[in-house]
Image: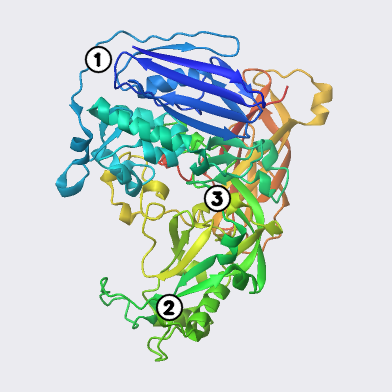
Amino acid sequence: MINLLVRRSFAVNGRTKLSVAVNSTRPSASVLVSPMLQSAEHTYCSSLSTQYQYRYNTGGASFQHNNTNNNVYALTAATFAAAASGLLLGDRYTSKCEAAQTTDCTTDNNNEEEEDLPTYTMKQVSQNNGKNGNRVWMTYGGNIFDVTDFIANHPGGSEKILLAAGGAIEPHWHLYRQHFASDLPQKLMEKMVIGTLHPDDQEKINNEMEILTDDEANDPYGHEPTRSPSLIVHGDTPMNAEVRGEILGQSYITPASEFYIRHHHPVPLLSEQDVKDFRLDVDLSLLSKKPVSWHDEIKKDKQTDNQTAKLSLEQIKSLPKVEVTTTLQCSGNRRSGFNDLKRTSGTPWGQGAISTAKWGGARLSDVLMLASQQLEDTTDVKHSLSKDTSTTCKLPQTLQNLHTLLDEHPTLQHLRFESLDGMKTSISIIKALNAFGDVILAYEMNDEDIPRDHGYPLRVIVPGYAAVRNVKWLSKLELAEEESEGIWQRALNYKVLPPSVVDAREVDLDKIPGLSEVSVFSGITQVSRVAAEKQHQQKMIPGETVLVKASGWAWAGGGRNIVRVDVSGNGGKSWSDANITQGSNQPYGRAWAWVFWECDNIPAIVCEDGKSVELSCKGVDMAFNTQPESSDGMWNVRGLGNNSWYRVRYDLV
């Protein structure tokens, strides 16, 4: 039996403190507490700065985690009971909830017999680390999991999950706290339990974690930026927040404070001295290799001379400044629509993981030429280049003719990016060096320094591509023969699997490209009844047709201009043409930003509740690509790229 006690009290500084204590008759019992789970029962909301304090793991020890933020959350007593039931992994529990008015709620599942599981020591667990053909075991909260068959399907990639192979998960989840933002990890882990950890070993882990979590000065999330309270927060460690629909359409250029946020790690914190000392590594070593035919065998073990330039922020700012207005959209935007059919893995975004900004910075090509010139001029032995034309970087000359560059270096296919937080990804060299591709290294956002949340001090902007390729906190560029290594380019994270595939082991991920240039999308931000109808007919009757007006946005990847937006109020039986109000004057084939649209006098059928209508919209781009009616045929286990008709029900009364 597990007793879960939830307390809620107010501190003198106005912060809400929420604490959870767990006691169990089973020494190894554990609870994974997820403050972001939703529950309709015992919900308490506060717009004040809130502090969550929750404890889990029993058997004489507890693990406490603190989390402070400035956003609106649903604080639920039943949330913690639901979280407990999600990862008790066989335990039945009784929860007692104590809130502002000492409200009690008790939940007791069927009194079924618990299965006795074998107990192992941490030494035994450590031997199962995936090496020498062994299985991969991990521990969490006193339980042992065999994750071997799950590794290929880990949403964060096999590289990350293997960090905990043969050891405890707790220290890693202290950094990757997105695991607490949903009950999905609990549900997945329930099926992997193979035993329990010896209580002495678990107590050591608990003690280590208590020291780690009490060390607020070194909390990786202890220096996060202040965010707008109007954002819809899906998880704050790391921060993942979208723009509210009513705000999304208010300004064609999204204010930096309202721009959606998608992070994988804590936001890097740079001091003034760090910024002065900042150097962007630009690795041009590939250009010093002896030119070979694309069909010749490439010797992977042959190392090229290290030809990496190091550019300061001031050097980059000294280059001609250009500005690019572009829309960025998370690859999982509208993932919640997929979840309505079948659950996916990842943040359940609505339509708000999209925003538009004006970015200012240096052309990528100019930065590469500056780096090449630095390497040619340097006398430093480490970076010196032979003056022999067969080894000297000739980028300033050959970049004037992209065809010449690729002819001389046919294996040059990719430009790799790396960030201060360790993220690695890449784009094709064609996109990177295309004079009309408008790729820049940005240091300004909406005429100000880029905020920390959006990439300070330097971010690569790759217009028309998935936002994940627009790497924040850029630290390195590298010309390469192959795409970037790592989970954000080659693993499951950003790959769209067929609808029938739920196990990544069934496909060869290397043959599936990662998301880069994206499709066509649209959304609705406002709906209202036509004013004339309001005056003549106050009551709405289910099944009858009324006239409404709506507004929204549309955007296509690859620079493809939006040529039309269609809006329907009767499930697609008829369509009304929207009027594009902003963004229609973008250059042909370089329409990097969204358009705003409005549509009047849309015939819409009143829903059965007598007060709402359901509207649909779809965008059409210059190639006459349009959005499919249903997401059913597009469903994928990672929930990426949902561009089916945008449908929304609006209450007009």
Residue 636 sits in which quadrant? top left
Q: Which mark is residue 331?
A: none
Tell me the residue that label 3 is attached to: 520
Tell me the residue that label 1 is attached to: 114
Question: Crowding at label 2, few (<14), some or many (≥20) Cα neighbours within 10 Å?
Answer: some
Whether residue 496 is visible to the viewer of this picture, yes or no, is: no
249 and 601: which is toward the camera: 249
Q: Image check: 519 left or right of 2?
A: right
The kind of residue tagged 2 is Leu
Q: Residue at x 42, y 35 (%)?
A: 211
Q: Which comes sooner in the sequence, label 1 or label 2?
A: 1
Tell me the residue that label 2 is attached to: 406
Q: Image check: 282 left or right of 448?
A: left
The kind of residue tagged 3 is Val
Q: Image check: 596 left or right of 148?
A: right
Which of labels 2 and 3 is toward the front?
2
